[in-house]
Image: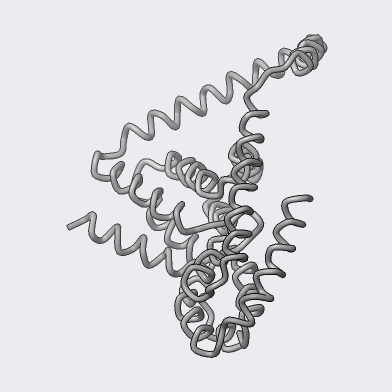
Amino acid sequence: MKTETEYLSLCEEFLSVAQCHSDESTLSNLKKYYAPCIDSNRKLSQIKDIRALIKVLEKRDALSCDNIEPLLYISNNFLNDCEIQSKLNDYLNYLKNIQYLTSYNMYQEPNENKNKESKFLNTTESTSQTNKSNESENKSKIEKHESRVTNFSEQEIALQRMLLSCISERIGRAWRDTVRYLDVPEYQIDAIQSKYALDLKEQSYEALKLFMSQYSNGNWKIKLIHALEKARRRDLKELVEKLILESNK
């Protein structure tokens, strides 16, 4: 995949610069900054250089081909290299262009797609009946979810919006594991990731909103806290607990 190749090349260039500009003090400061994300004293003690830190951040889904925030943070705060900063900015623009093209292709309807759609509509009568049955079932599910949402108080709706915003800003690629622990079906997770390709924030926001819409009482709070802990995002778990307590005052 071209994006991943571009990302790996960028990381190698970044590390060659970072290892020349960093020292023990820099590494110590970075370990403290990313300690909540890494969430393991054992892992932190094993990090002896910038390369090891980068590998751990990748394993924690804090750094990936579609999220280079850690590279930007390190570059902005600890490096003094205009060339690598320029390459990071170029990569960000590259991601934005891919995201735009993906979004554009998703909604356009060229003649070729219309022809394919026409062929699809000429399937057997039994398939058509199955589709109608599925549409009816999905409509029923949506109506049930909407009726549940109306049971939330204004205070609880405000809390949900605040949590959705805070979590989606920070959770990164860990959103998939989190919503799995919340029993969101795998096919819905895949659909959300496909719909909002290269936009981690929107992916996590929509997946968590889907989970919250399935509950009409306070159980969603407890399940969310437990899911974040299971997904090894104790920093977000503690943040959610704090915001929930503050909302009850």
> Which quadrant would residue 222 be assigned to in this image?
bottom left
Quadrant into which the C terminus falls: bottom left
Give the left or right position of residue 206, taking residue 115 as reference.
Answer: left
x 58%, y 23%: residue = 137
Q: Where on the picture, by quarter, is residue 11? A: bottom right
Query: Up-down: is 42 above or below 148?
Result: below
User: In the picture shown, does residue 5 fall above or below 71?
Assistant: above
How is this picture coloured?
Answer: one colour
| Count of marks placed on residues | 0
Write the residue at 38% across / 34% down: 148
Q: Is residue 164 left or right of residue 116?
A: left
* Front position in the image: 210 or 134: 210
Give percent across and percent down for residue 158. 28, 44
Q: What percent of the width, then of the height, locates residue 46?
A: 62, 87
Of the pair 176 and 103, the residue shown nearer to us: 103
Could you tell me which residue is drawn at 59 percent across and 59 percent down? 86
Q: Position of residue 166 (x, y in %)?
A: 39, 54
| Name of the residue lying farthest toward the front | 82
Name the quadrant containing residue 83.
bottom right
Task: Tell me residue 25's x, y (percent).
Answer: 49, 88
Q: Is residue 110 left or right of residue 198?
A: right
**The one of 20 and 105 positioned closer to us in this rendering:** 20
Residue 223 vertical position relative to residue 211 in the rendered view, above or below = below
Q: Is residue 12 above or below residue 158?
A: below
Q: Residue at x 46, y 81 (%)?
A: 32
Give whichever of 77, 39 is nearer the camera.
Answer: 77
